[in-house]
Amino acid sequence: MGHRRHGFTLIELMVVIGIIAVIAVIAIPNLLGARISANESAAIATLRSLSNAQALFQNSGAIDEDENGIGEYGFFGELSGARSLRDGSPPLRPAVMSSAFGAVVAPGFIQRKGYYYIIGLPAADGSPVTELGGGTVDPILATTSWGCYAWPAAYGSSGNRTFFVNHDGDIVVVDDSDYNGLDGGSVPMEAGAAFQAPGSLDSITGQIANGTTGRDGNYWTPVG
């Protein structure tokens, strides 16, 4: 007595493939959206942690280059204890940030969870000095000013929004597709992009555009 062979017909296979394709079309954007949302939430949390760490670092007086009794703000490597302080002192112990923040790449950015971060401290003219980009931090302005941008490593894939925080502790945000990854190894926005006009795009001093148009022409909104 013969045995009948069982299997899928071509039509059945095509139906199954079609169902899988429909599920993929629905699921993939949702998964991408969830990843972007998670990365952006992590970026906000990181900037809040950085703001707290900077306050602790400055209050401790770990760096006081002009010896006026007022501490100065620091870079990622200094805050994390990953490198000696810029006044020549040994690395900070205990550190005020995780050692993971010490993985700094020139000119001074780190990468975490789909976002790049870079801290700028002011030179005497208000222009930014980055951690590994050269330049001299002004010890007077560094007691009152610092700023940090967080922007997507891949716009539309790892994140859509760019964030900024400074010494006031306010975080502002903008959605600008030009702020995407690294532009030939450099930061894609000018240092003063998130600051109110008037003022130079190359200056990190002044008021940030907290619910107003920034020097880059974008409307920067506060993060709740």
Image (tube, helix red, strand yellow):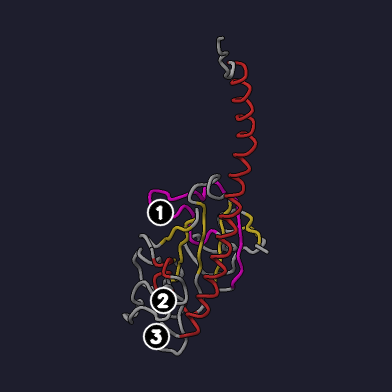
Query: What kind of residue is marked 2?
Result: Asp
Tag 1's secondary structure? loop
Residue 5 position in % (x across, y down): 56, 15
Query: What kind of residue is marked 3?
Result: Asp
On the image, numbered disc 3 is attached to which residue? 66
**Residue nearer the viewer, 142 or 148:** 148
Residue 159 position in % (x across, y down): 55, 50
Q: Is residue 172 magenta?
A: yes
Label disc, if present, on residue 138 of the rendered structure = 2
Label disc, if present, on residue 186 of the rendered structure = 1
Task: Identify the main secondary structure in magenta.
Answer: loop
Tag 2's secondary structure? loop
Query: What kind of residue is marked 1?
Result: Ser
Point out the residue furthest to the front here: 1
Residues in magenta, as a range? 169-193
Badge 2 local density, few (<14 within 10 Å), some, or many (20+)? some
